[in-house]
Image (tube, helix red, strand yellow):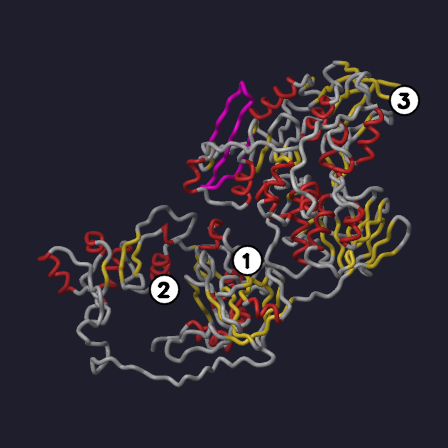
Amino acid sequence: NPGLTATEMFDALNSGKLKAIWILCTNPLVSMPDVRMAEQALKKAKFVVVQEVSSSPQTIQYADVVLPAASWIEKEGTMTNAERRISVLSKLINAPGEALPDADIICRFAQKMGFKGFDFKDAAAIFNEHCALTAGTNIDISGLSYDVLKQQGSIQWPYTKAMHDVVIDAGTSTGTARLFTDATFYTPSKKAIIHSFADVNESGQPTAIYPLILTTGRIRDQWHTMSKTGRVNKLKQHISESFVEIHPDDAAQRNIKENALVTIFNARGTVRVKAKYSTDIKRGVVFLPMHWGKILNSDLNRANNLTNNLVDPISKEPDFKFSIVQVEAYKKPVQKIIVIGAGAGACGFVKSYRALNVSDEIKVFSKENFPFYNRVMLPDYISGEQQWAQLVKMTDDEENNLGILLYRGVSIEQVDRKNKTVTDSNGTLHPYDVLLMATGSRAAMLKDVPAMEGIFTMRSRVDADNFRAHINPKKGKVLIVGGGLLGIELAASLREVGVGVTIVQRISRIMDRQVDTLGSQLQQGELVHKEVDIYYNDEIERFYGTGTVTGVKLKSGLALNCQAIVIAVGTVTNIELARACGLDCKRGVEVNEYLQTSDPAIFAVGEIAEFKGFLYGITAAAEQQAEIVARYLSGDISKYYEGSLLMNILKMHGTDLVSMGMAECPNDKDYEEVVFIDKAKRYYKKCIIHNDRLVGAILIGDKTEFLEYRDLIQNKMELSEKRLQLLRSGKTAEPVIGKLVCSCGNIGEGNIIKKINEGCLQLKALCETSGAGMGCGSCRPEVQALLDKAKVPALAEIIHIKAKPIIQLM
């Protein structure tokens, strides 16, 4: 009795005939034709063993026992390819933890069960027994052994004992290059038997309801269920998510746009993915790759929701290549969406969502009486380097074009989750289907700060305007408490307009969260060069002044005079509203991979979103999170949040400083550093590598590699040969043409227009090719404005550079 085939096993599990199953070297929850039935079968099974090299396959959640297996590189054995060629595969590295080769696991199990004959010394002994057992069969390799393979190289079967005896006398042999050259076949009559079958397709013919034929298969970079290839990030750069390939004529008939979300469905199930046009596929046929199973418990990307469970009676191969389906543009129910907050996350969501959906109602509530604007650039606004219009991220016309309602100067005071309503500061009730919280953070304050004029924080335009109105270059220095990014950027901006600056830092170095000790030292040198005074390991003990601050006394006893104080010692998340309505909160509002809170109708992004215990307080993270929410609400489950790359880009004229990922190398042999330094020039580059991946980088003095390193870290790309090129690329930065637009990448107006003239007419493509807007993202409104202007036929040439304006502070 040959036993049951894979599909028969799951039929038997589902019916109760089979009680237990041991799964190894496959993931049936992607490969079975009727995957939902396979899931039910595993739920019904009395005992499930899963033997796997990876923790990612969905089968593991049904396992009673998980046996960790070694991958091919972690064990030795033989491999036979499609032309019958047998080769020895040598072990290259040790398996991690308790993982063992599959053969070792089976042998140990057999011995525990009391079976004899499983005490093999090694893989060679197993192979040698296998060879002996084939003697006299059609696949006779009785002349083979590990030693023969190692001596002769790869050999094609059959390779009999007699053939090996000839080799001993004659020299070498590669086995049997071609079968049946003597016209003798493996049949009782020794003759070839050709079977004919009626040309009948039992899969089902297209109908008016299901007029298209679905075929499935693999894509270039992935294999089977992606248990192994899916772990290689380089392979995911080509195609990172599922899609349906459709002929443009079939798409046009259904009003389907390229890259639009579509639903593929039949009587068996539904799949939702993006459409990809292709003239390589026949009209009337669509293709869906087989590799994607469940994504975060959703099976909407799984091809085998649609495949039928017909099995060929001879080969037992399931009918994956022919199913009748219909494809339609996906239409989601119209919803009312309310956004609380008007920072980077809120703005990013509105723009991302409107690119996908123009039907839903969007209301945005902002405590501030201003349009969406860029808070990151407030230091440049204070110095006059940037005008207010340059900080605005969405004009009134853009608001109207996007069809959103921005309630300026109106806050949300209460959330009623049961009735799905919010109450604003005017007492008005607003219903919602989806609520997005993007309430951001406020400045952390020192203890016992007196209510005196001249003491500021820097979180809003009002803060910046009040500060500008207060200071005067002739009235003394500004004292900044805190040596982080904001404190240093503000210090540099004030020096631009001739205001003296003193920084008081509670610890022994500046930018301790952004760079390593050497990076701090180099940045200190830059500030000293700008005549900024810095006091370390000190704090304010007392404030001087009557009504208006005039100075401070430090705990060290030092007295400092000043005309103003700016407190820049961090932030506190604004989670009071979320906590009051009963959402799960810790330091922030807890969210899942789609930024959903403990209430599925409420999402959180930006500084308040706590993902797996971590808060990402940077603009790029807020925008990344906002895009995930926008895609999810539009019906796309393929992309989900896995955390953000922590990036710090110092916006200080004449200084290049970027840090990404890890700043300090752990004291661990698996981590290594690649460093280049020229202290005299304040030029410093460091890369931190772990398991052939770049996990951290610091660039000071030159950030030419910023975008390349950011992508390597963010995409967790294997370095391979690039490992030897780190900090040795010899790249030179393209000179800035025109007015500086992107300070993160040192990219000017002319550089961007050059790319527009080369054909980049979409914002995303323009940012990717020029490099502008790929850091903190704060310059994207300016990039969009250049793009919009370039689309006007009257624009014929690049606008020449003008001297930067300097606003005199009153």
Q: Quadrant of the C terminus?
A: top right
Q: Position of residue 713 (x, y in %)?
A: 53, 41
| Magenta segment, prevailing SS (helix, strand or loop) | strand
* 10 Å crowding of disc 3: few (<14), some (14-19), many (20+): few
Tag 1 and tag 3, C-beta contact below 8 Å: no
Q: Which residue is mark 3?
A: 547
Residue contact at pointers 2 and 3, CB within 8 angstroms = no
Q: Is the N terminus in the top left, top right, bottom left or bottom right quadrant?
A: bottom left
Report the number of discs. Answer: 3
**Residue of label 2:** 113
Mark closest to the chain's N terminus, 1 or 3: 1
Name the residue type under label 3.
Answer: Gly
Q: CA distance from mark 2 to mark 1?
A: 44 Å
- Could you say which disc has been placed on residue 386 in the image? none
Q: Quadrant of residue 121?
A: bottom left
Mark 2 or mark 3: whose residue is earlier in sequence? 2
Which mark is first along the chain, 1 or 2?
2
**Residue reaching furthest left?**
169
User: Residue 622 at x, y = what percent?
Assistant: 68, 45
Q: In the structure shown, which secondary structural element does the residue marked by tag 2 occupy? A: loop
Query: What's under tag 1, amino acid-wise?
Result: Glu
Of badges 2 and 1, the one in the foreground is 1
Q: Which residues are magenta?
A: 674-699
Q: Nearer the viewer, residue 54 or 761?
A: 761
